[in-house]
Image (tube, helix red, strand yellow):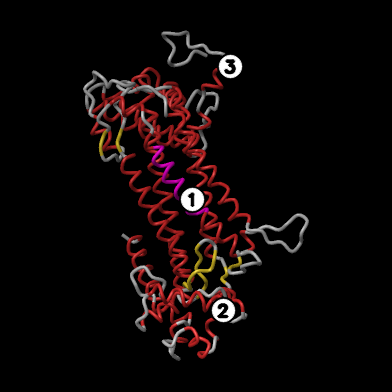
Amino acid sequence: MAKMWAGRTKGETDRIADEFNSSIRIDSRMYREDITGSIAHAKMLKQQGIIPAEAADHITAALEQILNDIADGTLAIDMESEDIHMFVEQVLTERIGEEGKMLHTARSRNDQVALDTRMYLRTQTEEIRNEIGELIRVLCEKASGYRETILPGYTHMQRAQPIVFGHHLLAYGWMLMRDRERLEDAAKRMNRSPIGACALAGTTYPTDRMYEAELLGFDDAAYNSMDAVSDRDFCLELLSALSIHMMHLSRFCEELILWSSWEFKFVELDDAYTTGSSIMPQKKNPDMAELVRGKTGRVYGDLMSLLTVMKGLPLAYNKDMQEDKEPVFDAVDTVKMCLSVMTPMIRTMKVNEENMREAAGRGFINATDLADYLTGKGMPFRDAYRICGRITAWCIQNDQILETLPLDVYRQFSELFEEDLYEAIDLANIVRKRTSTGGTSPDSVDQQIGLILAELNQ
């Protein structure tokens, strides 16, 4: 069958070429946006007197029926069509005849596909922001429940200083808050309408691009017709934001995997989010967390794929840009799937407070506070640091810990040590005194939760 774009050519292509050229298996998910955009275009054409009002009304009514028919399954999308735009236009023409051919006045598939993609991703971005917000709320709930649960904080994967588990969870909460902000920023730049830019040079018809943009919920229109149809930086910005978000989820999952191991045993993931081994009956594998970690590379690949597609394209539109949707849709789907698992996995996670506290009691993670104790007695910090390092070395050699080391041993290193040193290096006191803004104290955890929830509830 001859294509709707037949004219300069016969519109007859090889079957394999048709399959190679077709994008409907990817872009059919945008049917709602495509039809909604076409309805707005018909209304604009009517308002501007570019096509007869009666024809515009017939087009609008038919498009609304096509949308309903696809949505309820009455009309199946023909996967033999070239793309979703051609499918909708073909069905429209079949249903109302010659009037249907007027719809494509003052637009091109170039600006049409750019419009559909922006509208679709605008919706998906908001859905992802909401899902991230739900995960943040779960983190806040967990953090509140473990605002006084002490565990070792790590640097270089070595025990460093005592923290509370709620504070650790909220570190990811703040990362995810910034992820939401990045997505919001990306959505702002995404929300400029390209429709009316046509193929690349605009049109001689007296269109009203601002009216059409307003009908479709855009903040503004793209002001350069070539830019409107030939760039996909809005896709790239979204992919970048999603890649950063997946990096944060991956880091969190890495810790969940470590914490659920026998070596740590800090947490236990619910059975619903783990699997067993095919040969080792004792195993409980954190497969969902591992898959999130693994799928991060997939989203990175989507970003690199589109960056590579776009890097050498001259203006304006090139068929290469048909490759924009598969990576960005894949990234959107992947992130949403990961979030759908992460949120309940964290909500149902059990925390082993005793193991966390026991781990905090080993590793001399109160050594810094011991040095601060001497500094409070008037000793320069560097001298205090050196003395406490020697004390730690002595404890390691003699299988002792700072909390139970006798005072007379302490005084062999410095006469400044008094009985009150034990209160200074008590782990509960240490975290309670970390009251600096953003510190690990229970009060700080409460403050952070309040700030996060206030922002989420705006």
User: Residue 258's quadrant in the figure?
Assistant: bottom right
Q: Say whether residue 76 is left or right of residue 442.
A: right
- Residue at the disc numbered 1: 247
- Residue at the disc numbered 3: 15
- Residue at the disc numbered 2: 394
Q: Is residue 394 above or below residue 1?
A: below
Q: Position of residue 348 (x, y in %)?
A: 56, 65
Q: Residue at x 45, y 54 (%)?
A: 131
Separation of residues labelled 3 and 2 (CA atoms): 80 Å
Q: Position of residue 87 (x, y in %)?
A: 47, 25
Q: Residue at x 56, y 61 (%)?
A: 256
Per the rendered image, the range of residues in magenta is 235-250
Q: Earlier in the sequence, mark 3 or mark 1?
A: 3
Which residue is more in the foreground, 322 or 421?
Answer: 421
Of marks 3 and 2, the one in the foreground:
2
Q: Say whether residue 120 is left or right of residue 212.
A: right
Q: Position of residue 21 (x, y in %)?
A: 51, 21
Which residue is more in the foreground, 347 or 239?
Answer: 239
Please tell me how crowded label 1 is: few (under 14), some (14-19), or many (20+) other residues with Cα within 10 Å: some
Separation of residues labelled 1 and 2 (CA atoms): 41 Å
Q: Of the residues shown, which amino acid type is indicated by label 2?
A: Trp
Q: Is residue 84 above or below residue 361?
A: above
Asked if residue 86 is among those painted magenta in the image, a careful observer would answer no
Q: Earlier in the sequence, mark 1 or mark 2?
A: 1
